[in-house]
Image (cartoon, rainbow, N blue to C red):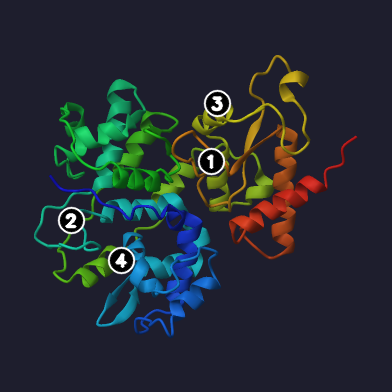
Amino acid sequence: MTVWRFDQGRLDYFQFDEIRRIASALTAIDCIDKPTIENDILREVLATHSVRPFAPANYTVWRNYKRVFGCLLLATDIAGKIICTDLCKILAADAGDIDIDDYLRHFSINFYYPSPIFEGYNFNDKQIFPVLAIVKFLISQFLLRNKPVITTDDIANYLIVNDVTGIEPSEFYANLQPKQFQGDFRQIRELIRFISQFSFLKWSNPNLYLEVTDKDEALQILSLLEPQITARQADAGAELLRLGSNFQGTALGNLTISQVNVVDTEFTEGSKIRVTHLRTERSAKLKAFYFANTDNPHICDMCAMDTLQRYPWVDRIIELHHLLPLSSPVRVETGKTSLKDIVGVCPSCHRATHKFYSRWLKGNGLKDFQNYEEARHIYQEAKKEIFLV
């Protein structure tokens, strides 16, 4: 049985807005010699792009985070030099045209076990594409049983124990029989939480949900998630560079945003990442999570109106507003569901907030907020300007 590994405990570095910032920093030092403690230029450059600590400071960033950068398919080291992948350079050059679905599609069809990122890599070993196995299994449950959810236990007992590769046709997943998994679930959860950034997946421990409009959309997603199986490199660094090459474009992102009925035309202005943002805000699953796990969910965070009291014939008129940078997913924590990056607002305040964002971004010559802190600050600025009678 192949062990499914991931970089446990560092999920803040695996959020898409952070991935873009890391990519920009890595590209700025592409092809330099690996830094030393005395001259850790990578730490200096990262500090200009990211608010993450990259701790501890008594080791070089590369020593402690090489595996993170590798898991993200961004960079490796060859002959003593840090080398960025093509994917890293694409993200750094113009990430606004690439959303989380585009990035995760590339990751899913290229990332396999046993991985060149970890010790013990052998280019002759059988390849297992874990993300493809998970998504195919989940979609098969939806298509055949109308059950758009699987659990961490399901992934372990149906997929890992049976050494499912993710290469099998979708019909294969309907006939899988479970066995008892004996192993560590922690790194499995890390991988699941990372890929739940797909716009069509939602995670609430221990459940992974599929959120699509219909079976046709599910089938279209399947058609775009086929593994890249080509000749592998014997050298782990060279193989990592191969995995970060041949980016296939934005087909999946275009598909998922096309399912959104865009009404905020002033705010979106044709911007792909903003339509992705709108899809997140209109997620039925996230709205259910919000109402189940939020104190006073009927009160608008902007104007403080109690919508249930004012409109007693409508149970859930509150809409979700996404505080993160617009191309980033919502973070749903483990344990009790926490939607700390979401606020509930009434429809009027929600539309007005988007107009405020549009005006502010235009005035500052930006397509998107640059980081979480900026996005939250501008939301608070909008909130302060409300005139309450």
Residue at the spot of label 3: 292
With 331 as the anchor, is 83 left or right in this view?
left
Q: Is residue 306 placed above or below 4 in the rendered structure?
A: above
**Chain-order first, disc 2 or disc 3:** 2
Residue plotted at (73% across, 47% down): 355
Q: Are marks 2 and 1 in contact (CB under 8 Å)?
A: no
- Give the crowd class for mark 3: few <14, some 14-19, many >=20 residues within 10 Å: few
Marking on residue 114: 2
Disc 2 vs disc 1: which is toward the camera?
2
In this view, 303 is above or below 269: above
Mark identifier at residue 245:
4
Quadrant of image for the C terminus: top right
**Residues at marks 2 and 3, CA–CA distance in whole angstroms:** 39 Å
Q: Earlier in the sequence, mark 3 or mark 1?
A: 1
Q: Is residue 69 above or below residue 274?
A: below
Report the mark closest to the observer, 2 or 4: 2
Placement of 333 over or under 366, stated as above or below: above
Residue at left 16%, top 62%? 121
Which residue position is annotated with label 1? 280
Proximity of marks 3 and 1: CB atoms separated by less than 8 Å:
no
The crowd level at tag 1 (other Cα within 10 Å; few <14, some 14-19, many 20+) is many
Farthest front residue in view: 58
